[in-house]
Amino acid sequence: MVTPEQQKWVAKLLGYDYEILYKLGRENSAADALSHVPGSQTLNALFVSQAKIWEEIKIASIDDAYMTRISKLAAIKSGLPYTNCHGLIFYKNRVVVPP
């Protein structure tokens, strides 16, 4: 299961080109204990599918007239409950999914 905090980081990192590298525990003495829990491959697979969902939402938002208007308003008027972050539209820190 992906936490809201992980979803927030996915949205922030979506626009960057990066690579996650595995580092052995003995090489990384400050590693978090949770990184050693078996089954992390399932979490990695879930993370990848979430990234695809974000891309699909971004593409659908571009094609939707209502979402385009909201995006333009959010860019012009600060203080609205809508914000843009890496091509995604948020309403009060929640992703807006086009119809």
Image: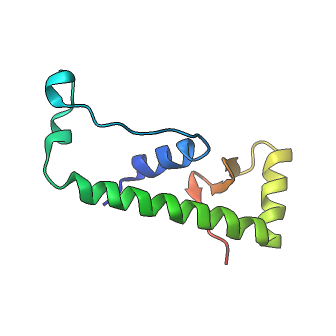
Q: Is residue 97 above or below residue 1?
A: below
Q: Quadrant of residue 47?
A: bottom left
**Residue placed most toward the observer, 68 or 31:** 31
Query: Which quarter of the picture shows residue 33?
Result: top left
Name the residue rendered at 14%, 47% in the picture. 37
The residue positioned farthest toward the bottom in the image shown: 99
In this rendering, would 40 be left or right of 69?
left
Please provide percent x and percent y for residue 65: 83, 71
Q: Position of residue 63 (x, y in %)?
A: 78, 71
The quadrant where residue 28 appears: top left
Colouring mode (rainbow / by chain / secondary structure / one colour): rainbow
Q: Which part of the image, by quadrant, shows the N terminus?
A: bottom left
Left or right: residue 14 compared with residue 36: right
Residue at 80 percent of width and 70 percent of height: 66
Residue 22 placement (x, y as % from top left): 29, 37
Compared with 56, 15 (above or below) is: above
State how many labels appear: 0
Q: Is residue 51 left or right of residue 66?
A: left
Does 94 sit above or below residue 75? below
Q: Residue at x 71, y 66 (%)?
A: 61
Q: Residue at x 29, y 56 (%)?
A: 43
Considering the image in quadrants, where does the C terminus appear?
bottom right
